[in-house]
Image: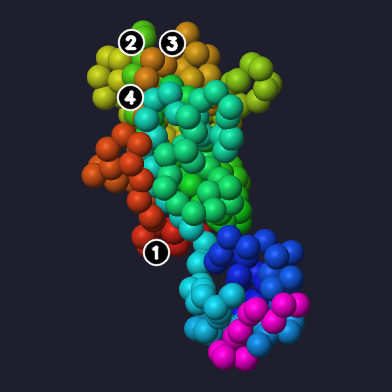
């Protein structure tokens, strides 16, 4: 069950204030009856009409995008193209990115309007693993596997990262799994070893893998299984 004003503000372009006004104007019907209380409890199955037009329930929204280079993952940016600019969806201002990627990084970006879900994805205490494909300027030494497993000391924060799993793929290429999402974390972990990340691509967050069908800048809704996988 959900409040009528919440149902409508979530499912239409109308703000809660406009919905209150519509109620005063007797412009909202629930199951054929004029609604008088914005707080009345309704369910997704109820038939809701606003100014003569039926309004289907719009639940929370969840997307994955294959973020291209040079696109920023902040919600608004005067200069750069943002990930939200690439979405063709209504009410985009209600959406946010769950776990940012740097402007020069590519790959899996999650976008939603569900703040509780986002917390689950980004909170280090929830141990939601993020997997990155990394290309480096200098060769990757075998000894780094053990160092990453013990956590890397980040000087600027005076703190060690949580244990990370490094899988060396070739001399300048690796797959790194981390459980946090600190600012520039992967780049700083490699920099702390005297190496430099030249390209970074996120492949996976928790159980959610980037869909390889998605070309650069394309996106799709998450499946229910993907949504539920973060709990
Ligand atoms: N680590 C980084 O350094 N950059 C990102 O975009 C994500 C993780």
Q: Left or right: 116 with respect to 99?
A: right
- Left or right of residue 160, residue 25 in this image: right
Q: Is residue 167 visible?
A: yes
- SS class, disc 2: loop
Residue 17 spot, x, y in % from top left: 74, 64
- Answer with mark 3 or mark 1, whichever residue precedes in sequence: 3
Residue 195: mark in rendering: 3
Q: Residues within 10 Å of mark 2 (few under 14, many from 20)?
A: few
Crowd rating for badge 3 (residues with CA inside 10 Å; few <14, some 14–19, many 20+) = some
What residue is disc 4 on? Answer: 174
Which type of secondary structure does the marked residue at label 1 adopt? helix
Residue 143 colored in magenta in the image: no
Instruction: Give the x, y percent position of residue 36.
Output: 73, 84
Mark 2 vs mark 4, CA separation in Å: 10 Å
Would you name the residue on which mark 2 appears?
139
Disc 1 target residue = 224
């Amino acid at each position: 069950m959900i409040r009528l004003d919440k149902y409508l503000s979530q499912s239409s372009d109308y703000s809660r204030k406009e919905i209150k006004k519509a109620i005063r104007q007797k412009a909202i019907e629930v199951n054929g009856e004029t609604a008088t209380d914005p707080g009345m409890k309704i369910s997704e199955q109820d038939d809701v009409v606003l100014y003569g037009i039926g309004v289907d329930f719009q639940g929370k929204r969840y997307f994955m995008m294959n973020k291209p280079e040079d696109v920023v993952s902040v919600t608004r940016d005067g200069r750069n193209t943002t990930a939200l600019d690439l979405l063709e969806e209504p009410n985009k201002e209600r959406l946010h990115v769950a776990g940012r990627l740097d402007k020069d990084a590519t790959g899996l970006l999650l976008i939603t309007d569900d703040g509780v879900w986002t917390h689950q994805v980004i909170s280090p205490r929830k141990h939601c693993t993020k997997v990155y494909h990394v290309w480096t300027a200098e060769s990757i030494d075998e000894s780094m596997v053990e160092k990453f497993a013990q956590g890397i000391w980040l000087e600027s924060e005076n703190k060690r990262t949580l244990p990370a799993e490094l899988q060396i793929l070739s001399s300048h290429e690796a797959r790194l799994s981390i459980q946090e999402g600190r600012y520039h974390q992967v780049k700083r972990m490699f920099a702390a070893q005297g190496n430099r990340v030249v390209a970074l691509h996120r492949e996976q967050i928790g159980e959610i893998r980037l869909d390889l069908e998605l070309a650069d800048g394309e996106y799709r809704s998450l499946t229910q299984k993907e949504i539920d996988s973060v709990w």
